[in-house]
């Protein structure tokens, strides 16, 4: 495990990591279009919760609280492409078929575990997905993106066994975010 950050505050989120071979396979099947910035394969993940800025002193409490999350490992499969539009930009994502309910349950458990650790969780509707790209000027490009996404309707991209989640710090740069895994929490049921 890498050392905890020295900075007193880290922009953080909780995520499920997807095996590299599956991320590469999915990336190789994706459409590319002008005006869309694709995520680097290494940056693809499933976000469970955005925590905003987390102080280093709270990381130990978060780890202890997350270790109490009780859930058995489960299968996640990817299918289809969708788009979330917000004002002038959009997010293109790969949808989740099998495992969607389990991811929603895990996201709720992670959010609940943040409370005793005293860490704020951004209040966002949880939609299980893997972001693959961002589009500026969504209003003008929306019809084209919807057409492309429609051509992937029902396409299955593969699956993996979800057996852990990570706390990840994020540093935003001009060339994209830099993610650092802070610690992993294994799923282990009610043992």
Image: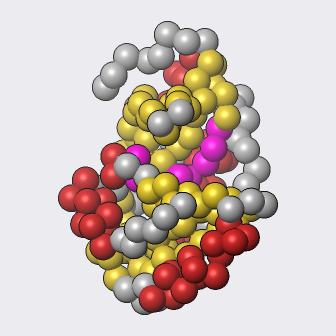
49 on left or right of 133: right
Image check: 79 left or right of 158? right
Determine which quarter of the picture holds residue 38. Answer: bottom left
Instruction: Please report the residue visible at 64 percent of the width from the left and 58 percent of the height from the top.
Output: 136
- Which image quadrant is residue 145 in? bottom right
Q: Position of residue 91 (x, y in %)?
A: 59, 62
Residue 4 placed where, x, y %?
44, 18
- Determine if residue 71 is in view: no
Between 76 and 62, the one lying in front of the other is 76
Instruction: Using the image, determine if residue 178 lies above or below residue 126.
Output: above
If the image is split into quadrants, where does the N terminus sit?
top left
Residue at 46%, 61% (x, y): give it.
Answer: 132
Main SS type for the magenta part? strand
Q: Does 29 appear above or below 117?
A: below
Q: Identify the residue shown where x is 30% and y is 59%.
A: 23
Q: In the figure, is residue 53 to the left or right of 110?
A: right
Q: How is the image coloured?
A: secondary structure
Look at the image and give the residue range highlighted in magenta.
43-51
Q: In the image shown, does 113 or 142 lie closer to the viewer?
A: 142
Q: Residue 139 in the image: x percent, y percent?
A: 73, 70
- The residue depicted at 49 percent of the width and 55 percent of the height is 37
User: Eyeballing the image, is 115 above or below 164?
Assistant: above
- In this view, 153 is above or below 3: below
Magenta stretch contains residue 47: yes
For this rendering, which residue is in front, 39 or 77? 39
């Amino acid at each position: 495990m890498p050392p905890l950050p020295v900075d007193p505050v880290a922009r953080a989120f909780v995520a499920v990591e997807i095996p590299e071979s599956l991320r590469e396979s999915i990336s190789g099947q994706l459409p590319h279009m002008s005006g869309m910035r694709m995520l680097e394969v290494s940056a693809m993940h499933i976000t469970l919760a955005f925590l905003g800025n987390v102080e280093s002193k709270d990381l130990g409490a978060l780890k202890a609280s997350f270790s109490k999350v009780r859930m058995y490992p489960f299968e996640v499969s990817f299918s289809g492409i969708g788009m979330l539009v917000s004002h002038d930009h959009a997010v293109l994502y790969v949808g989740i078929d099998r495992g969607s309910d389990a991811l929603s349950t895990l996201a709720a458990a992670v959010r609940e575990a943040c409370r005793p650790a005293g860490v704020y969780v951004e209040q966002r509707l949880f939609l299980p997905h893997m972001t693959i790209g961002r589009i500026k000027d969504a209003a003008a490009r929306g019809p084209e993106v919807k057409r492309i996404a429609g051509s992937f309707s029902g396409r299955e991209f593969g699956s993996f066994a979800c057996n852990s989640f990570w706390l990840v710090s994020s540093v935003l740069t001009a060339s994209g975010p830099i993610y650092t895994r802070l610690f992993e929490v294994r799923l282990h049921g009610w043992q």
